[in-house]
């Protein structure tokens, strides 16, 4: 299952992330906290994408009349996705040892690597 990058509801993103990770790992409470944080960031990034799509990638601004600048929502969405990927990469699931959590990092890279 893939997490739809256009989901704007944090609870829907959270549910999709939990379903994705629980196929590979037994999640611990700390993992759920990381998912909660990441879900809010990913939902906000999707909301910003919708604003940019509506308003356009270039908007009026700058120091001179008629000057256009890159929409600040683009950079903020990228920052949110990068931060969310960092939180999701920390998910390790139950267990000990160096191999613990390798599936979670692979899943994050496969799903969000191209968006960071």
Image (tube, rainbow, N blue to C red):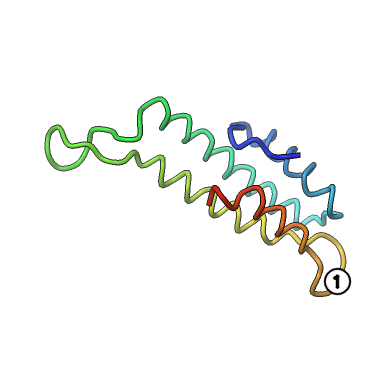
In front of the other: 110 or 3: 110
Q: Position of residue 40 (x, y in %)?
A: 60, 42
In front of the other: 21 or 38: 21
Q: Quadrant of residue 96?
A: bottom right
Q: Residue visible at 73% across and 59% down? A: 91
Residue furthest out toward the left: 64
Q: In the image, is residue 112 above or below residue 11?
A: below
Q: Position of residue 90 (x, y in %)?
A: 69, 62
In front of the other: 65 or 30: 65
40 sits left or right of 56 in the view: right
In front of the other: 84 or 102: 102
Q: In the image, is residue 14 above or below residue 93?
A: above
30 sits left or right of 112 in the view: right
Q: Secondary structure at mark 1?
A: loop
Q: Quadrant of residue 71?
A: top left
Q: Position of residue 53 (x, y in %)?
A: 42, 29
24 sits left or right of 65 in the view: right
Q: Residue visible at 57% across and 45% down? A: 41
Q: Residue visible at 60% across and 58% down? A: 86
- Label 1: few (<14), some or many (≥20) within 10 Å? few
- All told, the count of numbered labels is 1
Residue furthest out toward the top: 54
Q: In the image, is residue 34 above or below residue 66?
A: below
Residue with the mark numbered 1: 96
Question: The N terminus is located in which quarter?
Answer: top right
């Amino acid at each position: 299952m893939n997490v739809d990058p256009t989901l704007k509801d944090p609870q829907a993103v959270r549910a999709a992330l939990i379903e994705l990770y629980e196929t590979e790992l037994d999640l611990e409470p700390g993992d759920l906290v990381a998912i909660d944080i990441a879900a809010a960031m990913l939902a906000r990034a999707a909301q910003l994408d919708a604003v940019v799509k509506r308003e356009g990638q270039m908007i009026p601004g700058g120091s001179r009349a008629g000057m256009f600048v890159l929409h600040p929502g683009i950079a903020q969405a990228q920052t949110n996705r990068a931060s969310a990927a960092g939180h999701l990469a920390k998910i390790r699931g139950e267990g000990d040892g160096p191999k613990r959590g390798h599936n979670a990092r692979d899943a994050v890279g496969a799903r969000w690597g191209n968006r960071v």
